[in-house]
């Protein structure tokens, strides 16, 4: 396997010295790029892109051709696991993901078998292998999964949700049922991420997009506990290289210390917390990823630079910071503004490293 030409992202996650702050963007491959929209219409739809390793690799590399990003992220989706579990994932235009057979009862959960990622999800592993080969060591490849709680919200609600009434009803009326689902998901996520690591993912990230809708106690019981189990089960070193793991709970700033205590290498932050406070609270325990509001990419280049400069100053001197947006890039952002963002991080961060 090729050595990395640019390992800034891995080094920052491991708190080793870097020359500049590394940067990548959540959802950096996707609909804000005209070349993505063109390839998607050729392929037919989003899942056809995910299931074709050659196209998935091409889409992964598209943003790297435009911007000097310090990491690539596998082009796939968190909902591949529930799809492989037989729930029948489909996308309705403008409405986001949906499941044909959502989870309604214990017997629906009992029917879910153990996944073999190199079997039902072989297309994901093939994409990882293909991307690693196409990247040729340019930057590290990030693998990912949804958290058990976040996956369960889609599986029980049958799609995206605003109020989470079905899963909250299950959580409070049938907690043992929900725990049995989360347990199965945690096992599958460990197997899935370890298979991605063996296929070539050089770092992994767990997206807990909906952990922040829980009460502090329920966040610990129904979300964090299962992410902790996953961290415990992950391969942390592979072929002589440490594989850093990042946990991202959107709206989870108030639980930072608890997230950091799972043994992860880094915590992802959204924009509702100041990164200076976050750093003071976690100390040397973990690296931090974040945390510019993606909506700032609608602003002028000057305003984008100003915000980048402020966040760099807030984090302060030294390593341990991976610059990112606090959530995915919006689909109607001008690609040039993403370029301004990435270049600003590189230029303005030199002053914070020796
Ligand atoms: O970051 C990247 O560039 C890698 C690819 C990636 C996608 N989804 C591609 C995608 C990643 C890391 C994800 C994760 C994901 N998927 C999350 C967690 C992160 C987050 O954003 O909170 C969640 C909750 C999902 C579930 C999901 N998939 C939703 C809600 C949607 C619809 C989004 C929308 O805006 O319509 C998807 C579809 C999806 N996943 C798209 C992409 C590029 C859009 C599909 C299209 O081309 O139409």
Image (spheres, rainbow, N blue to C red):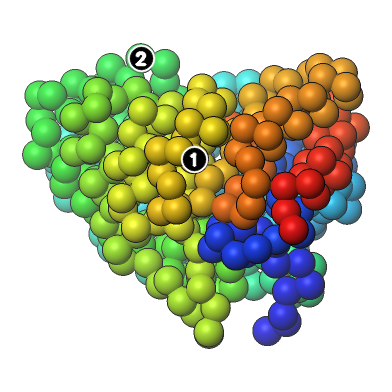
Residue 84 can be seen, yes or no: no
- Compared to residue 321, the image places residue 164 above or below, namely above
Q: Earlier in the sequence, mark 1 or mark 2?
A: 2
Residue 298 appears at what percent x and percent y? Answer: 79, 18
| Labelled pair 1, 2 in contact (Cβ < 8 Å) | no
Quadrant placement of the N terminus: bottom right
Percent position of residue 303, x then y: 82, 19
The residue under label 1 is 279
Q: Is mark 2 within 8 Å of ligand 1?
A: no
Total labels drawn: 2
Find residue 121 and report its horizontal and vertical position in percent. Answer: 48, 62
Quadrant for the C terminus, please. bottom right
Identify the residue shown where x is 72% and y is 54%.
353
Residue 181 position, x and y percent, is 22, 45
Query: Would you say the beta carbon of the disc 1 residue lies within 8 angstroms of ligand 1?
Result: no
Residue 40 figure quarter: top right
Tell me the SS state at disc 2: loop
In the image: residue 138, left or right of residue 185 = right
Q: Residues within 10 Å of mark 2 (few under 14, many from 20)?
A: few
Residue 96's place in the image compared with 278, above or below, is: above
Q: Residues within 10 Å of mark 1 (few under 14, many from 20)?
A: many
Q: CA distance from mark 1 to mark 2?
A: 32 Å
- Ligand 1 located in image quadrant: top right
- Viewer-side residue, 274 vs 328: 274
Judge depth for marks 1 and 2 and give the one in front. Answer: 1
| Image quadrant where residue 5 sits | bottom right
Identify the mark at residue 163; answer none if there is no mark: 2
Q: Is residue 261 visible?
A: yes
Tell me what residue is drawn at x 51 percent, y 51 percent.
Answer: 287
For the point 55% across and 33% down, the residue is 275
In the drawing, does residue 209 fall left or right of residue 165?
Answer: right
């Amino acid at each position: 396997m090729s050595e990395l030409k640019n390992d800034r992202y891995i080094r920052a996650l491991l708190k080793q010295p870097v020359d500049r702050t590394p940067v990548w963007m959540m959802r950096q491959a996707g609909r804000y790029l005209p070349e993505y929209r063109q390839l998607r219409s050729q392929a037919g739809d989003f899942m056809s892109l995910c299931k074709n390793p050659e196209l998935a690799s091409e889409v992964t590399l598209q943003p790297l051709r435009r911007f000097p990003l310090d990491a690539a992220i596998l082009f796939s989706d968190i909902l591949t696991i529930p799809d492989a579990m037989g729930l029948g994932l489909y996308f309705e235009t403008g409405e986001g993901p949906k499941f044909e057979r959502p989870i309604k009862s214990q017997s629906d959960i009992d029917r879910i078998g153990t996944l073999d990622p190199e079997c039902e999800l072989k297309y994901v592993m093939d994409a990882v292998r293909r991307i690693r080969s196409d990247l040729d060591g340019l930057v590290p490849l990030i693998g990912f999964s949804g958290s058990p709680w976040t996956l369960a919200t889609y599986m029980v609600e049958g799609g995206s949700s605003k109020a989470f009434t079905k899963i909250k009803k299950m959580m409070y009326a049938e907690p043992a049922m929900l725990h049995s689902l989360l347990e199965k998901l945690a096992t599958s996520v460990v197997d899935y991420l370890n298979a991605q690591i063996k296929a070539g993912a050089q770092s992994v990230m767990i997206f807990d997009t909906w952990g922040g809708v829980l009460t502090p106690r329920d966040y610990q019981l129904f979300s964090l506990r299962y992410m902790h189990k996953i961290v415990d089960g992950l391969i942390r070193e592979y072929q002589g290289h440490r594989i850093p793991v990042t946990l991202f709970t959107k709206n989870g700033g108030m639980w930072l210390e608890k997230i950091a205590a799972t043994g992860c290498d880094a915590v992802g932050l959204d924009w509702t917390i100041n990164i200076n406070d976050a750093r003071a609270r976690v100390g040397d325990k973990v690296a931090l990823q974040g945390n510019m509001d993606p909506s700032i990419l609608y602003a002028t280049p000057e305003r984008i630079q100003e915000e980048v400069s402020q966040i760099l100053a807030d984090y302060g001197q030294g390593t341990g910071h991976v610059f990112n947006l606090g959530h995915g890039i919006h689909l109607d952002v001008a690609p040039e503004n993403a370029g301004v963002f990435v270049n600003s991080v590189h230029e303005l961060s030199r002053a914070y490293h020796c």
